[in-house]
Image (cartoon, rainbow, N blue to C red):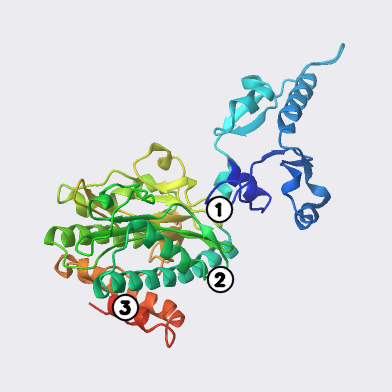
């Protein structure tokens, strides 16, 4: 996986849209570390940074070198005349289950290769202190950009009566984000969707083939950005008119699911597969559900979708337990085909939780949310929230206001008024 190579050598590139990776391979042996890449892409600073400890080879040379390694292993396992055959286990090359077949064959196939879940991917998913702090910081800036965007969009649609299509709105959001410190680009195509389009989970508006945003309908915006200090992915569902009772109920059930996962405390060793139902329970109680996972791993200035961890019903989510330092999304939803769609998405980070007891002397984990964007007040049915859920929402909104108001106080009256209104205590 390209993101594993980028993480392993602490490098970033721009060969793949939205993902700061570069075409490359890596081979690590007990004595060498080799990076296979087009050397013309490496600046003098990168070459100096890698130093003599990393061998740089042409991208295509990986197959030739793999054959050489394969031959070396064959000669190692073939005893010379008169020598004794070792009874020890045969050594093999370890490659990721996601590596190419061509690479496996050049290394000698099954005889020489052991396919495993990549230990690099496992290590990459556990963020260090610098990466975690970067995720906190970039989500504050990104949250401020989203608040500015939503305040602008409401003003354009509801006050000025402007006609804006989904792509025009998405372009405006990118423009606002691009003003942020450390901004590099988007982390995926913005899902800017109005009305029935919001019911299409992976909807992608195209210029000339999208809808004009209807202020009397649901508007769902799923977007994210790449910053030098982290990667963001946020979804908010809004209504600029008067939502129906069904829309308010569905939104509130989804919100309850967001809160349930956000506030979970669970023993170390628990997988995201085991947590999934906690986010769905309120929809299930009404005979409702959604056809996507509840959460995916998020990279640190890397791929916005990052394995191997996540929250959902996919069997692979049962294979790797969540660990302190994991960063995942929390995004339940509800969709009515041809009518509307609702999704709320925060990014949360797993951390050790303080508990009264430690059964079995085992640590317990919980989550810290880093997304700093208000929920849509107009879509919340307060009668469906418990006192604890109301406390969570008030505390969350207080935090959002405190951390993002400095971007607008005395500078942007429109966004400041919108932010204060949306974060008002319920």
**Reading the chain from its start, which is encountered first: label 2 or label 1?**
2
Find disc 2 in the rendering and name its residue: 181
Find disc 1 in the rendering and name its residue: 302
Which corner quadrant holds the N terminus? top right
Q: How many discs mark residues in the rendered view?
A: 3
Q: Nearer the viewer, residue 379 or 172?
A: 172
User: Is 315 on the left or on the right of 50, as rendered?
Assistant: left
Mark 1 or 3: the one toward you: 3
- Find residue 294 and report its horizontal and vertical position in percent: 34, 50
User: Mark 2 packing: few (<14 Cα in 10 Å), some, or many (20+)?
Assistant: few
Compared to residue 268, the image places residue 160 above or below, namely below
Tell me the quarter of the picture where residue 55 sits: top right
* Alpha carbon distance from label 3 to label 2: 23 Å
* Alpha carbon distance from label 1 to label 3: 32 Å
Mark 2 or 1: the one toward you: 2
Can residue 44 be seen in the rendering of this structure?
yes
User: Mark 3 packing: few (<14 Cα in 10 Å), some, or many (20+)?
Assistant: some
- Find residue 398 and report its horizontal and vertical position in percent: 35, 78
Tell me the quarter of the picture where residue 85 sits: top right
* Alpha carbon distance from label 2 to label 1: 17 Å
Residue at 75% x, 46% y is 40
- Find residue 226 and report its horizontal and vertical position in percent: 53, 59
Which corner quadrant holds the C terminus? bottom left
Compared to residue 172, the image places residue 96 above or below, namely above
- Find residue 245 and report its horizontal and vertical position in percent: 12, 62
């Amino acid at each position: 996986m390209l993101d594993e190579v980028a993480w392993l050598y602490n490098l970033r590139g721009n060969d793949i849209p939205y993902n700061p990776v570069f075409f490359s391979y890596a081979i690590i042996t007990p004595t060498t570390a080799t990076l296979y890449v087009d050397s013309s892409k490496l600046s003098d600073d990168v070459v100096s940074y890698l130093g003599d400890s990393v061998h740089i080879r042409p991208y295509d040379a990986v197959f030739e070198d793999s054959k050489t390694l394969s031959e070396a292993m064959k000669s190692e396992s073939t005893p010379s005349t008169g020598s004794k055959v070792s009874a020890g286990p045969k050594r093999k090359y370890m490659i990721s289950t996601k590596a190419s077949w061509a690479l496996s064959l050049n290394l000698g196939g099954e005889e020489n290769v052991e396919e495993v879940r990549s230990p690099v991917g496992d290590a990459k998913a556990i963020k260090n202190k610098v990466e975690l702090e970067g995720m906190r910081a970039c989500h504050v800036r990104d949250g401020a950009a989203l608040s500015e965007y939503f305040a602008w969009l409401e003003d354009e649609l509801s006050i000025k009566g402007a006609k804006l299509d989904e792509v025009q709105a998405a372009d405006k959001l990118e423009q606002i984000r691009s003003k942020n410190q450390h901004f590099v680009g988007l982390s995926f195509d913005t899902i800017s969707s109005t009305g029935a389009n919001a019911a299409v989970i992976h909807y992608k508006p195209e210029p000339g083939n999208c809808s004009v945003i209807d202020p009397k309908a649901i508007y769902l915006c799923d977007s994210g950005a790449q910053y030098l200090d982290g990667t963001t992915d946020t979804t908010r569902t809004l209504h600029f008119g008067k939502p129906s009772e069904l829309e308010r109920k569905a939104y509130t059930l989804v919100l309850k699911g967001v809160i349930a996962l956000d506030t979970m405390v669970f023993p170390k060793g628990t997988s995201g597969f085991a947590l999934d139902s906690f986010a769905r329970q309120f929809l299930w109680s009404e005979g409702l559900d959604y056809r996507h996972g509840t959460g995916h791993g998020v990279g640190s200035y890397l791929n916005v979708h990052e394995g191997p961890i996540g929250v959902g019903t996919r069997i692979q989510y049962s294979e790797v337990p969540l660990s302190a330092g994991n960063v995942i999304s929390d995004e339940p939803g509800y969709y009515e085909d041809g009518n509307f769609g609702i999704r709320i998405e925060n990014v949360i980070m797993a951390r050790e939780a303080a508990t009264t007891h430690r059964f079995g002397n085992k640590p317990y984990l919980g989550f810290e949310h880093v997304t700093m964007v208000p929920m849509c007040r107009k879509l919340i049915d307060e009668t469906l929230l418990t006192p604890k859920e109301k406390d969570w929402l008030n505390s969350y909104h207080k935090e959002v206001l405190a951390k993002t108001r400095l971007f607008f106080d005395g500078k942007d009256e429109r966004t400041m008024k919108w932010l204060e209104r949306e974060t008002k205590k319920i």
